[in-house]
Image: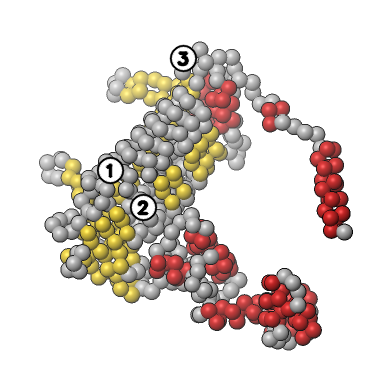
Amino acid sequence: MKKRIVSAIIAAALLIMQAVPAFSVGSFAPKYATPEGYNENDYQKAVAFMETEDEYGVKNGEKIVSFFNGYYRPNDPESWSYYYYDHDNGILYLYGIFWTDDAEKRVCALELYNMGLVGELDLSGMSELSEAYCDHNGITKLNASGCSLLRALTCKGCKIEELDLTGCATLDLFDCSDNHIAELDVSDCVSVTDIECADNDIESLDVSGCVALQWLNCANNSLTSLDLTCNPELEYLRCTENRLKTLDLTCNPGLPFDMISASGNGFIGFSNYGYIDDYGYWVSMNAAAAAPAPNAEFLGWYSESGELISENTELAPGAGRSRVTARFTGGAALLGDANGDGSVDSADALIVLRASMGIVQLSEETASACDVDHNGVLNTADALMILRYAMGLIEGFPENRTDTKQKMTAELRSFFCRYFGSISARTASKASSLSFRPFRNMGALLKEGSCAFCR
């Protein structure tokens, strides 16, 4: 009987599929035909971005040409750019999207700084693109995959959540600071020397292939780990205001420490900073940095042998300071607080969910604080309980494993009684006899008595 029902469903689905006209992806004609002499990929992706409208119906193309009092013509790519040379100050000003002069014209440069542009910017496959400057716009997604000649890309101060740099082997300068990026993979950028990615929401940063990397600023993110073992040329590093517990710098001879770690409820980082001296010269400074968790106290920096070195949160390098530990006391971790900001919200639930999937790693203390059902394992059940607490659906977390079971039992009874009426002994016995294991367990729980809802 079951086989007949399944067969009938499949047959009905096939009939519906046959009744709907089939369309191939290529059957949809583009809004504008590619002008003669222009590359199909580059023009179609560029014009799609130019045609994107903001909430007031103003197109990106109209905004770009307004900077040089031009008239936006979507079928005339040459009208999308303008430049002039300021002879008095020796400055060349560039605006818009520029094309090569080859027989088949390709996009070669983007100068889109602070123009109020919105939407997704797809540059994938633009193999002649060498520079792209699109800072301080409302762009939400940027795809630069396959830009094999791209040397510089800056997109700071936008609203980018997703960024793809696959195949950008020639990229040298990259700045995506002040966005909303959660994962950043620059491992394909083997030539990159400068990376600015501070002030994002980054939980995972992959710089494993960046063998030429000299400058990395990843401060003010949500990193719990940072692997720099494949970056031997690194000379500048700023990774403060994260959730790092250890920082292994043994493969970075250009940095003055070998290992920086934290003990207790606090985090560590490293910062290059400097100042201009009385003679106008820039003086570079290096320091390990310590930051206590909420309600915790910083005790000091200790050497590998356990000797107190300094009670200042910033520690300059020196003799006997290659391996140092920042010690903290107090400030027991708040249950469910995965990002250490002193509160529990949906962001913590997302971090725990990602940690349970192996996407990010949490410190031992944080993982313990986020095991809110006290079963010794960080899993999706913990993430769900944290989310429910953040939404106000539960008043708090159980104090121990027994309390967890009791609360789950009460919730199951309440659910069944709400939707199926009071639970009798006969109903509970029937549930226990079902072959599906969750129902057997549920029946055993229900046998313990009726819930408060139906009393």
Return the x and y of residue 42 as percentages of the image width and height: 54, 25
The residue indicated by pointer 3 is 101
Q: Earlier in the sequence, mark 2 or mark 3?
A: 3
Q: Identify whether 118 is placed above or below 337.
A: above
Q: Nearer the viewer, mark 2 or mark 1?
A: 1
Q: At which x and y percent is residue 300?
A: 23, 67
The residue beneath circle 2 is 226
What secondary structure is found at the residue carrying circle 3? loop
Query: Tag 3: Cα neighbours inside 10 Å, few (<14), some, or many (≥20)?
Result: few
Label 1 crowd (10 A; few <14 / some 14-19 / many >=20): some
Q: Amino acid at mark 3?
A: Asp
In this view, the mark in front (1 or 3): 1
The CA distance from mark 2 to mark 1 is 14 Å
The label nearer to you, 2 versus 3, is 2
Disc 2 element? loop
Q: Nearer the viewer, residue 124 or 246?
A: 246
The image shows residue 229, relative to residue 335, as above or below, that is above
